[in-house]
Amino acid sequence: MLKIAKEENQCRVELFQVNKLNTLFSELVKQQLIELVEEPGISVVFNLEGIHFIDSSGFDVLLEVSDRAREVGSQLKLCNITDDVRELIILMELEGRFECLTCENTREKILAALD
């Protein structure tokens, strides 16, 4: 479900074989992301490239993980947000709740975000 690459105090996370973050697997994603952000000082970049839909449970996960990261002194950053997901963020009035990165090339995107 999640591909995780960890280098020192930085993690790169991607969903694979899915194009949405919804109720079916949001709890599993939450558990894995929470484990990552529990380490103070870590920066987690969650690559949403190819994700075209996030339902309310998916947004709840992102909000909960983001809030938890702030509480323990780590970071959750979203990268490569599709236009569809960006529109959902606006519709749900969640702008400003997430740190979003703009990146260029998939592999370079995440690496650039970590620099």
Image (cartoon, helix red, strand yellow):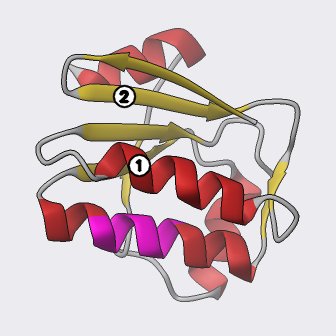
Image coords of residue 94 (percent x, y): 48, 81
- Depth order, front residue of 25/52: 25
Q: Classify residue 89 by image quadrant.
A: bottom right
Q: In this picture, is 6 found above or below 70?
A: above
Helix, strand or loop at mark 2: strand
Q: Residue at x 62, y 63 (%)?
A: 86
Q: Counting other residues with Cα less than 10 Å from the Cα at mark 2, is it few (<14), some (14-19), or many (20 or more)?
A: many
* Res. 11 mark: 2
Label 1 or label 2, whichever lies nearer to me, is 1
What amino acid type is highlighted by mark number 2?
Answer: Cys
Q: Main secondary structure of the magenta part?
A: helix
Taking 43 as reference, is 95 left or right? right
Q: Classify residue 113 by image quadrant.
A: top left
What amino acid type is highlighted by mark number 1?
Answer: Glu
Q: Residue at x 76, y 36 (%)?
A: 1
Q: Residue at x 48, y 50 (%)?
A: 33
- Is residue 66 inside the magenta stretch? yes
Precedes in sequence: disc 1 or disc 2: 2
Helix, strand or loop at mark 1: helix
Q: In this picture, is 86 found above or below 11?
A: below
Q: Which residues are magenta?
A: 62-68
* Res. 35 mark: 1
Q: Residue at x 61, y 87 (%)?
A: 92
